[in-house]
Amino acid sequence: VEHRRGERPAILEHVVMNKLDPHPWARAYPELGEGPLSIEPYVSPAWFEAEKEKIFKRLWLCVGRVEEVAKPGDYKIKRIHVADTSAIIIRGKDDRVRAFHNVCSHRCNTVLNEEGDETYGHCGGAVMTCRFHRWSYAGDGRLIGVPHDRGFYDGFSKADNGLAEIHCDLWEGFVFICLAEQPPMPLADFLGDYGRYFAGFPYAEMSLGFKYETYLNCNWKVALDAFQETYHVPFIHNSFPHTVPSGPRNFQTFGLHRSCGIALDFTGEPSPVSQLANTVRASLVAQKEGAMLSSAMNPDRDPNYSFELSCCFPNMLLHVAEGIWFSNTFWPVAHDKCFWEGRYHCQPPRTNSERWAIEHSVTLQRNTWLEDTATMENTQRAMMSGAKKIQNLQDDEVLLRHSYQTIADYVHG
Amino acid sequence: MAEQMVDPKLREIIQRYGAWNLATHNERWARRRTSSEAELKAFYDDMLPLLPDILAACDRFPLGELPAPYDALLNVAISAAEVAPHVELYRGSPKVPNSFEESKFIALRGDRADWCTV
């Protein structure tokens, strides 16, 4: 990479600021430690198996938004490799969103056809019918139709052979499932203070959603970590020379979950087309007025505060800002492979020019994600070399440290 | 269809850049990736001064109700928004520099013309 020397004095300022107080988070969270972290959790198949059993098959996982299944009969099927299953998320005729394993009670064919990791569709009358022998199920999972059912024997009853249900609950329009037979706690308790901190944001008003996804040949935590710090931003995203992010501000943990504020320092004028887009419709990098964010956020009322960067344990990074929210979710597939979903949500355009400005914002967000994801497969390959047993974290990478520790506690617990 | 457009500058831009009149995100994205640096620069330079007029012309119609020539004009303007970062930020490179392989990113509904309004 060619560096443009002398063009970004604000980065130096950022470094100088850190030097004034280089370890605020180690002092605030001594339990997270200061030492290097092992790379074993990123390269070990045994560690991956432990994460599967102790985290992903046990705890609540966010699998989407209610808007994705807006009308009765709408469904989404999500393959969850890390739990060896596919979940059907369907809105029933009673308007309730439920989740089921996509497994027919007859001879275990998938009830609904899947096209890749995520499949969207609609069932008339919210009735799910298996293509194989046309067994059909109501939106609440009851088995309601079996062709030639008299051919089955005594002891077979439709009432006992509904779809296998998955625990499903909603928070602020986000759909969560828990694959455990019995969730260790209700969703509200799992989210706890994190859920309260992020409640009330007008997620549903941001009904226009864009999503990019891809497989990454890296451990899910390599990708998660890269998105949990802003240390990389001046270097990986050096195409934005005039936008310099802060390190974590007001970092706090909520049990398993964590959050911090990020301020953006604008050291120059936006590029001409960005400037035009900003005048049409404020985008992420435009400072703007508004009061969508909770008063608990940005307690110092920093005028440069831009967005909240948070992790909903284990695998979803949720960000809220005035006028948008965006998220990154990392689904483990194997110890060295994951499926990434990046979402960007905003209010729908009211005019043609607003539509144009939104397209521009989405383009910039996509390109930023393309820059982010560029390092991940390289990191994994280098980790797999075995040349290094540890990684070194600085104080601004405190979110990674908390992430590492909470995951390790489950794996060892 | 361009004849229906009153402003001769806008009429001309549709005629010259009809190849960028693409209805979907995936098409605009692919065209940018496969264009040359010189093509992107010429397109950007011609479009930049006209963008405010183009958007104002399109805003005379309600969202989703653009007559065909204005729909074409907006498509070309959105293509310019796709291209702009490459001229403004990436020193002309038709690819996002130092990025993950772009063709491996899948955009949900990226093949639908209404992806920005549904």
Image: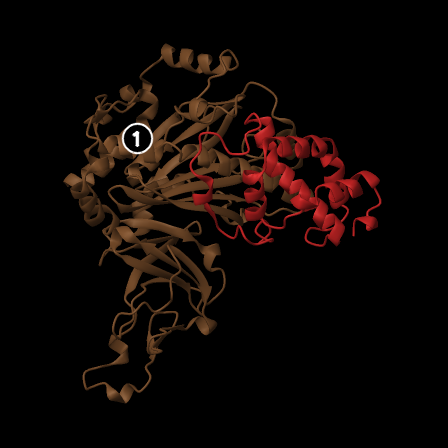
Chain colours: A brown, B red
Q: Check disc 1 and report its element: helix, strand or loop.
A: helix
Say which quarter of the image contains residue B36. top right
Residue A182 percent coordinates (x, y):
22, 57
Of residues B74 and A284, which is closer to you in this image? B74
Q: In the rendered view, would you say B41 is above or below A86? A: above
Relative horizontal placement of residue B1, taking residue B21 as reference (left or right): right
Which residue is at a point 60% across and 51% down the rendered structure image?
Answer: B117
Tag count: 1
Q: Is residue A306 visible?
A: yes
Quarter holding the C terminus of chain A is: top left
What x and y, as percent, mark residue B40? 62, 34
Residue A296 visible from this viewpoint: no
Q: Is residue A165 above or below residue A337?
A: below
Q: Is residue A242 left or right of residue B62?
A: left
Q: Chain of mark 1?
A: A
Q: Residues within 10 Å of mark 1 (few under 14, many from 20)?
A: many
Residue at (19% x, 37% y) in the render: A409
Closer-to-camera residue (A43/A201): A43
| Residue A406 spot, x, y in % from top left | 24, 36
Q: Amino acid at mark 1?
A: Leu
Q: Is A303 placed left or right of B5 in the picture?
A: left
- To which residue does mark 1 refer? A400
Q: Residue at x 23, y 46 (%)?
A: A55
User: Closer to the camera, B102 or A112?
Assistant: B102
Q: Position of residue A343 (x, y in %)?
A: 46, 44
Quadrant of the snapshot with the N terminus of chain A:
top left
